[in-house]
Amino acid sequence: MLAEQRGRFGSARSHVLLQREGWRVNHKRVEWIYREVGLSLRLRSRCKRPSHLRAIQI
């Protein structure tokens, strides 16, 4: 299976690989199968960064 060979690939990347191999599969179906089998990767939390640097007032 494709997911066994490439364990860190998510459903979106696996969908692209399936398309390259000639499969005609909907991306929503690939996502659904990933969730059913329990292969969904844990989402990482992003670090919150300030949008701009603050000037020090004297």
Image (spheres, rainbow, N blue to C red):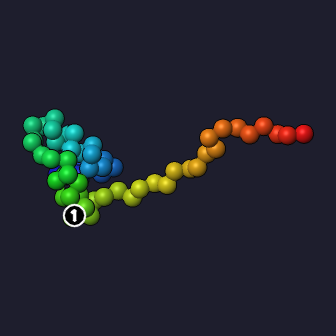
Counting labels gives 1
Outermost residue toward the right?
58
Residue farthest top in this picture: 20
Q: Residue at x 46, y 54 (%)?
A: 44
Q: Relative to the observer, which residue lies in front, 46 or 14? A: 46
Q: Quadrant of the C terminus?
A: top right
- The secondary element bearing badge 1 is classed as helix
Q: Callout 1: few (<14), some (14-19), or many (20+) C-alpha neighbours within 10 Å?
A: few
18 over 36 or under it: above or below: above
Quadrant housing residue 15 = top left
Q: Amino acid at mark 1?
A: Val
> Which residue is pictured at 33% across the width and 49% down the height?
8
Q: Residue 56, located in which quarter of the rendered image?
A: top right
Q: Is residue 26 above or below residue 41?
A: above
User: Which residue is situated farthest in the front direction here?
Assistant: 57
Please provide percent x and percent y for residue 39.
28, 59
Which residue corresponds to mark 1?
37
Residue 33 seen anywhere in this rendered image of the structure? yes
- Viewer-closest of 20 and 7: 20
In the displayed structure, 49 sits above or below 44; it is: above
- Which residue is rendered at x = 9% and y = 42% of the image? 24
Q: x and y percent of residue 5 in the render?
A: 24, 48
Answer with left or right where residue 2 lies relative to residue 7.
left
* Front residue of 8 and 35: 35
Residue 9's x, y, as percent?
A: 30, 47
Is residue 6 visible to the viewer in this orientation of the structure?
no
**x 41%, y 56%: residue:** 43
